[in-house]
Amino acid sequence: MNNNIADNIKRVRENIANAALASGRDPSSVRLIAASKTQTAESCREAIRGGVDGLGENKAQELTAKYSEGAYEGSELHFIGSLQRNKINALTGKAELIQSVSSFELAAAIAKRAETLGLVQRILLEVNVSGETSKSGASVESVSELTEQISELSGVRLDGFMAMASQTGNISRQFEKMLRIYLDFTGKGVYNNRYIVLSMGMSGDYELAVRHGATMVRVGTAIFGAR
């Protein structure tokens, strides 16, 4: 095993545990997704052996190529990059969770593809919590309506939310805003006892995200090193 990757995962796990305990949470409630953009198939396998909960890819073409190499065997595969409609066919059914669904139109296209494959695709609604026009994601104001619309689609299962904080703004405030959205939604009991995901936090801010309620973090550099 690549000791650097294994040691880095151990260190990230310890940081997650400390952040969770500091906020009165069980560390096991936070899932660690290794953001494996540009990493080799072997590095992905090393991360799996090192104990991550899943791998997340940013590019559909890279995901497809490494999928064929068996890079993700024994682990969950997530798509965490900007989602283009013309990549939906390639991703649906391969990624257990598509995190970056930013509109009803994308959700409907995924649902249609999933139905043709005879499956239900798990997705997250990406929210533009910073409000910056350069960032992808649904607006904060549209979340309530979108969750209701997407929940009516039979080919997808909306499992929660994903957000990416802007590094030029107040990161804590953005995470707090996303947590309020998450709590407001889960409090409605729409999914009964279903596990609801709040995916936020990357290498530079995952500990802060955990302290603000993240149930899933997407960590790349802190696991694999600088690209």
Image: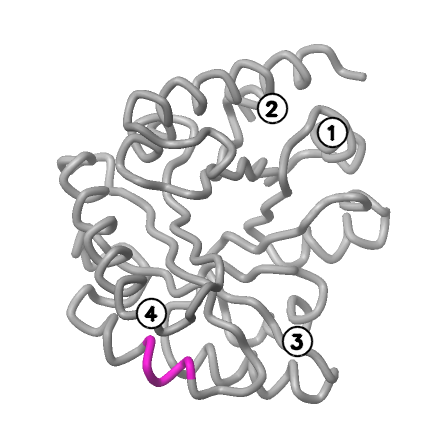
Instruction: Answer with mark 1 or mark 3, whichever residue precedes in sequence.
Output: 1
Disc 4 is placed on an element classified as loop
Dot 4 amino acid type: Gly
- Identify whether 163 is placed above or below 88: above
The residue segment tinted magenta is: 147-151
Q: Which residue is mark 2?
A: 224
Task: Verify CB contact (< 8 Å) between mark 4 and mark 1.
Answer: no
Q: Is residue 3 highlighted in magenta?
A: no
Question: Marks 4 and 1, how far apart in space?
Answer: 40 Å
Question: Marks 2 and 3, how far apart in space?
Answer: 29 Å
Q: Which dot marks residue 189?
A: 4
Question: Marks 1 and 3, how far apart in space?
Answer: 26 Å
Instruction: Answer with mark 2 or mark 1, whichever residue precedes in sequence.
Output: 1
- Is disc 3 surrounded by few (<14), some (14 to 19) or many (20+) residues within 10 Å? some
Q: Which residue is mark 1?
A: 43
Q: Which residue is mark 3?
A: 89
Disc 3 is placed on an element classified as helix
Q: Is residue 200 left or right of residue 227?
A: left
Instruction: Answer with mark 4 or mark 1, whichever residue precedes in sequence.
Output: 1
Quadrant for the C terminus, please: top right
Dot 1 amino acid type: Ser
Residue 38 at x, y percent in the picture: 63, 38
Residue occupying image coordinates x 41% and y 61%: 160
Task: Verify CB contact (< 8 Å) between mark 2 and mark 1.
Answer: yes
| Quarter-of-image position of residue 98 | bottom right
Residue 107 at x, y percent in the picture: 47, 78
Residue closest to the far right = 69
- Identify whether 152 is placed above or below 204: below
Dot 3 amino acid type: Asn
